[in-house]
Image (cartoon, rainbow, N blue to C red):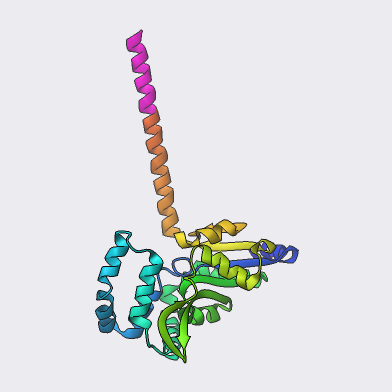
Amino acid sequence: MMHEMLGADAQDEKVLSVFDFDGTLTRRDSFVPFLRFAFGKAEFIRRIFTLAIPSVHFLFRRMNRDELKAHLIAKFLTGVEAQWIEQKALDFCNRYWTRLMRPSGLLSVAAEVEAGAEVTLCSASPALVLAPFARRLGIKLIATELEVVDGVLTGRISGNNCRCENKVIRLEAVYGLLSEYRLRAWGDTRGDLELLAAAQDAHWRHFHSAWRRGRMRRAKKRKQHASVQKLKSENKTNTDDQQGA
């Protein structure tokens, strides 16, 4: 039924379905685990410790997320052959696909593809790392590009980190004005809000069943607390009225 509805929409208008990757289609972040996989535990720990000061600056808001990511990329990927990263990314995808990917997310991607929508990942993670995942999903990829000179990574980002408003900018650079599409979008963090705001069909943490249950519990507690406070207020008013009488 869902496929039929999506198919009907696709016939009436162009549908662009955009999925964030980390935390949306995956159970957790992928880039840092990829670095640990690619470089090995010992080398990963050695390098990550050298990022302690930038991490502290980030925690105390003296450095933003993009700046911290730039430090991470420079520390791990400066002077590394792009082909080596591509092979490691393929190995990482093959080994961790089942453990990393959310089954409900995979079903949703497949449904969008089957319905005839234009489907793409749009992620802040490096495109070199996510390329095998996009190929396996059978969809396109828009992600953070790393600067490569003569086949070697410079340790710098090419352009901007693909998050926040840059997701919308990158999408429009590829597909043109998003207003010409029925935009369906899935995201889970602050970095997806501009994308979700541009979408007619926005899905926030759609595949986070545990999170959604937690949200419902918190909402129920807030409602109960509000009811208790209201009851206390009414009781106090009645008491004051009686004393005044």
Position of residue 214 measured from the top left corner of the image (x, y, whole percent):
40, 53
State the residue in front, 98 or 40: 40
Depicted 176 relative to depicted 156: above or below: above
On the rendered image, what quadrant is the N terminus found in?
bottom right
Q: Which secondary structure is most common in the magenta stretch?
A: helix
Depicted 222 relative to depicted 131: above or below: above
On the rendered image, what quadrant is the C terminus found in?
top left
**Tag count:** 0
Q: Is residue 208 visible?
A: no
Depicted 32 relative to depicted 234: above or below: below
Q: What residue sits 29% from the left and 59% below the top?
A: 60
Q: What residue sits 44% from the left and 66% below the top?
A: 23
Q: Is residue 244 visible?
A: yes
User: Magenta residues?
Assistant: 231-245
Q: Is residue 94 magenta?
A: no
Position of residue 138 measured from the top left corner of the image (x, y, whole percent):
58, 79
Residue with the most extreme right position: 12
